Amino acid sequence: MSDCREKQFHTHEFLGSTRLAELEEDPHNHRFAGVSGPAIKVKGGHVHKIKTRTDFYEDHFHEIIATSGLQIPVGNGKHVHFVEAETTENEDHRHDLIFATLIEDPIAEEED
């Protein structure tokens, strides 16, 4: 079991909708939401792992497994991340998705 006193790095909420798939047979998309993994330090800043499932459409869902881009400052010491990915294949199709995470810890005051 992990020690609750370990330092937790920040995470981001995210939500969105996939792009349409099966345009000829059964056009549809899916919604998704979740919380990213903690910040992972990389050259130029940090990224986050994203892993979630979409909602169901008729008889299927998709998984989303991705890594965000680097942090994008939005002012007042806050930032978001851009994510461009593709779902897993299910029912013989995949969905593309593009979204930005929500601002990390939006109600916290800026650190000095």
Image (cartoon, grey):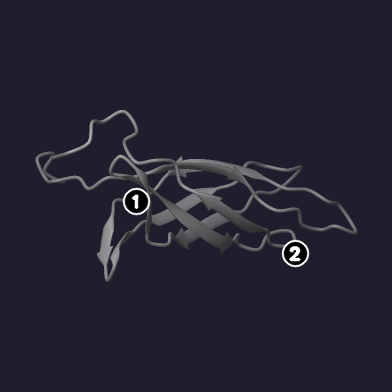
Q: Residue at x 60, y 59 (%)?
A: 87
Quadrant assignment for the C terminus: top left
Identify which amino acid the numbered label 2 is placed on: Asp
Query: Residue shown at 27%/45% (left/top)?
Result: 10
What residue is at 67 percent from the left and 45 percent from the top?
A: 30
Do labels 1 and 2 touch, CB within 8 Å? Answer: no
Quarter of the image for the N terminus: give it: top left
Say the numbered circle drawn on residue 80.
none
Name which of mark 1 and mark 2 comes first in the sequence: 1
Mark pair 1, 2: CA separation: 29 Å
What's the residue type where badge 1 is placed?
Gly
Q: Is residue 71 visible?
A: yes
Say which residue label 1 marks: 37
Question: Residue 61 location in percent, x, y?
Answer: 65, 49
The residue carrying pointer 2 sits among few (fewer than 14), some (14 to 19) or many (20 or more) residues within 10 Å by Cα, namely few
Q: Position of residue 84 (x, y in %)?
A: 55, 61
Label 1: element kind: loop
* Dot label at residue 92: 2
